[in-house]
Amino acid sequence: MPASDFTSDEYTARIAKTRSAMAARGIDTLIVADPSNMAWLTGYDGWSFYVPQAVILPATGSPIWWGRTQDRPGAAQTTWLDADHLLDWPEEHVQHPDHHPYDTLVTHLRDRDLTRAIGVEMDNYYYSAAAHQVLLTAFGQDQIHDATGVVNWQRAVKSDTELAMMRKAGQLSAHMHTTLRQGFRAGRPKHELVAEVQAAGVAGLPGLAGDYAAIAPIAPSGREASASHITWNDRPLTAGEATYFEISGCYHRYHCPISRTLYLGDPPADIRRAEEAILIAIHDTLAAAKPGATCEQVAACVYDSFAKAGYIKGNRTGYPIGLSYPPDWGERTMSLRPGDTTVLEENMTFHLMPGLWTADWGVAITESFVITPSGGEPLADIPRDIHVVPP
Amino acid sequence: MPASDFTSDEYTARIAKTRSAMAARGIDTLIVADPSNMAWLTGYDGWSFYVPQAVILPATGSPIWWGRTQDRPGAAQTTWLDADHLLDWPEEHVQHPDHHPYDTLVTHLRDRDLTRAIGVEMDNYYYSAAAHQVLLTAFGQDQIHDATGVVNWQRAVKSDTELAMMRKAGQLSAHMHTTLRQGFRAGRPKHELVAEVQAAGVAGLPGLAGDYAAIAPIAPSGREASASHITWNDRPLTAGEATYFEISGCYHRYHCPISRTLYLGDPPADIRRAEEAILIAIHDTLAAAKPGATCEQVAACVYDSFAKAGYIKGNRTGYPIGLSYPPDWGERTMSLRPGDTTVLEENMTFHLMPGLWTADWGVAITESFVITPSGGEPLADIPRDIHVVPP
């Protein structure tokens, strides 16, 4: 997601929104370690999040990129920041037992007098308990505030440019699912099919190149699919088994995850019943997903449809999506589930996940959609029914 | 990496080694949140690490898998643990603002009287500052010890079974590089080539299926390659530019990363000089990498070769590899660099990274190898020279 994908006005607006949220929480300086949030604020892109890095957003002035020396040229290439706002920590601190890169961050913060009312993303993959301890020791508990999700929440309503990118991701997702349906046949080792589908997502379509998705293809078959996060293996596709593929095209780090279920042979009655419940759930949810409705109201469409079919769905049924890096393409803010009373706004985007997992099989048919005044509008056009192939 | 890849004796040995390390540090109960460590101890496999999960290793008795309810069937499928040792936290805690899955872990630990001398992986992607705070509040600072890397260090010396799997990963890496050389030509949009190379790694070879690598393909061209972690884009391959591909085959979660550089046209003298320095560095390092040598002694071969060629390499030049999950295929223990006096042992495995990045270009030619009494033995067989293609 190079910074050049968006206008400088868009970045200005993103920073202003984030600063309002900081002010409301009494945060003067926000340390943003989530790579998705870093990219959204500055454009920074690179597979460098396996070492400490952050965007520092003070109350005024330019944001600052901070990372490993070796990644500074990447920040110069991908962000809109000027060279004075690219700070680094020395290579010898990489995964070193005796000192931590955050020691250097402390020095940078002191140099700039950014030592009070500091917000950190305490519940994030890329901000560790060790990093937190360095900041606590340097600045004291009173100056460190939990700011988990502060930037994520600002990302919820998408701009027109972002929506255009998510629709491109949706075209890539559709292309992947077309490749999947064409290649799905009995006896085929699953990893071969996964290779084809993933390649379709990256090779993309004319004028539309794919990026790596934030989650690897999830593709369990038969009883494997009683578990919800099994990736793939080399077992041949087998008659009498449902396989679901949870996959996403990715365009400049924007995602459009879509699951579909395929079956070799005649699906049994319980799987057909689940399919029908899911299709009704999707239909009803999309109809209800208008600005002003709440997350739990929309989610109720899914739980109701399952209950009518005699199934209980125990887990949440959707979450916001957009710009993301591994290991999750969700935005980790709202959830479509009971108790979440967040009011939906126009141009919020969700992955609706009415999957059903039993002890013997799993069926997942999902949609990614945008909230519009006339309801949820799918971001990709892919047939929803279970794709049935003769064994 | 299903548990069935290894004998129960191998798992018993892994746990015994880990318990010795725990005892040496005064740790009674180890909470292992790193998915690579979880897999190494129990076989657990699944893309579920985007929510809190762990293996709990008490001083005696079976390890315990702990994760989200929805992932418990995956633990039953992939680990060797019995059903009594698969504990879960309720679905409604998924990414919920008001309660944390670690609250449930506290209850589980109290129920089993595992509340003292608890080790945690403080500097890990999958153990957050928020998780740490829950444990600190529950058990007190005195009962929580930093155990970052404790399991990682036990993984350093590979078993014969592990080495066989890494050699299979090496065959996949070689197949990917063959595909790369065959597909590399002027004018080709890079994402198309990446799609082919990645598909080769997953489709694999007869009897040899590929898994997803812990790092997406790194593949910068020309000036982009002055940055070391740029992935790819849709720009056509261009005459007069070096492109390096840092990629890895993955077999049942074991890796064999290998970088190669390709050039369209005649490489200029400075790039040829870097190539020669790198090839000498690899040759000398492999000769020196015997049991008894230290990390820094072996690394000196690289720094010396660069210095003779008039280049300064500022970063570390290698790290241990093996079983891994995103976002890193390194084991995060030793480093091949000055100051690391760890003594090498037979059957340790490293990714030797004598890459060189200047302001205008980058060249990376790397090898993954195993320490043997006769020196470092490459885990894959791939021509090392810069692959030159007429423009």
Image (cartoon, coloured by chain):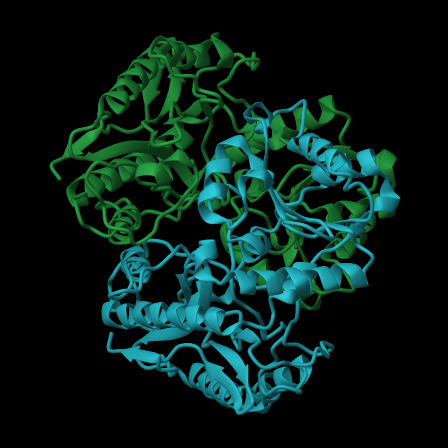
Chain colours: A green, B cyan
User: Where's residue A55, x and y in %?
Assistant: 64, 44
User: Where's residue A147, x and y in %?
Assistant: 70, 32
Quarter of the image that includes the N terminus of chain A: top left
Is B15 rendered above or below residue A173?
below
* Residue A74 relative to residue B265: left or right: right
Q: Residue at x 68, y 35 (%)?
A: B105
Q: Residue at x 59, y 73 (%)?
A: B157
| A59 and B243: which is toward the camera | B243
Q: Which residue is drawn at 82% across and 34% down?
A: B137
Q: Is residue B360 visible?
A: yes
| A280 and B84: which is toward the camera | B84
Q: Is residue B241 visible?
A: no
Is A38 rendered above or below residue A339?
below
Is A162 rendered above or below residue A64?
above
Quarter of the image that includes the C terminus of chain A: top left
| A125 and A49: which is toward the camera | A125
Q: Residue furthest left?
A: A390
User: Where's residue B351, x and y in %?
Assistant: 52, 73
| B54 and A143: which is toward the camera | B54
Is A255 rendered above or below residue A370?
below
User: Where's residue A30, x and y in %?
Assistant: 70, 37
